[in-house]
Amino acid sequence: MNMHESGADQKEILYYIASAAESVMGHGTATSILLLDKEGLLRNGASPTLPDDYLQAIDGLKPNPNVGTCAAAAATGCIVITSSFFDDNKWGELRHLPLSLGYVGAWSVPIKTTDEKVLGTFGTYLSYSRRPSEEELKGTALLAEAVAIVLTKSKAS
């Protein structure tokens, strides 16, 4: 049975995955699934608790190893960690955006196909400065794999 037959569409499934991550990580976190569009720009796939004005401000970011965490993860295909927006030059132009929401750090895991093609990013924002634990990184990587499956299966159906 494909996703359409089950009654769940791709956006709904991505929303549930992002919401589950927020629930597990607890208070003071927000997640964001950004997807590369046909032009290679990052677009919102699911961001359950981030406000619309924030999502509009980051909409259309180009993958760039020197910008933020999600744009850098999309450009490099590697996990990018920023424990403090104040200390990371990649956030120079953008740090005011998450800081205005009370977030001070973030990390992003690339969402990739089995042949390593980047489809987007799974970002996590934190309201206090710290590095993610190994368990959090592993869990987020597993969720990114689940998102990749959803994206590739929905294209195949």
Image (tube, rainbow, N blue to C red):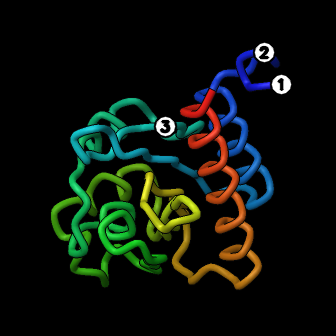
Q: Amino acid at mark 3?
A: Gly
Q: Which type of secondary structure does the marked residue at label 3 adopt?
A: strand
Q: Is residue 12 left or right of residue 151?
A: right
Q: Extreme left residue here?
A: 93
Q: CA distance from mark 2 to mark 3?
A: 21 Å
> Looking at the image, is mark 2 or mark 3 earlier in the sequence?
2
Q: Quadrant of the C terminus?
A: top right
Task: Tell me, for residue 5, which label it has, or none.
Answer: 2
Q: Which is closer to the viewer, label 2 or label 3?
A: 2
Task: Tell me whether the residue at label 1 lies in contact with that at label 3, contact meaning CB atoms closer than 8 angstroms.
Answer: no
Residue 121: percent from left, percent from top: 47, 57
The relative height of residue 137 versus residue 34 in the rendered view (above or below) is below
Q: Is residue 127 left or right of residue 8?
A: left
- Local crowd at mark 2 within 10 Å, few (<14), some, or many (≥20)? few
Task: Tell me whether the residue at label 1 lies in contact with that at label 2, contact meaning CB atoms closer than 8 angstroms.
Answer: yes
Task: Tell me, for residue 1, which label it has, or none.
Answer: 1
Task: Tell me whether the residue at label 2 lies in contact with that at label 3, contact meaning CB atoms closer than 8 angstroms.
Answer: no
Q: Is residue 32 left or right of residue 142?
A: left
Q: Amino acid at mark 1?
A: Met
Residue that label 3 marks:
45
> Looking at the image, is mark 1 or mark 3 earlier in the sequence?
1
The relative height of residue 83 versus residue 37 in the rendered view (above or below) is below
Residue 57: percent from left, percent from top: 26, 40
Q: Amino acid at mark 2?
A: Glu
Identify the residue at image location x=42%, y=60%: 118
- Local crowd at mark 3 within 10 Å, few (<14), some, or many (≥20)? many
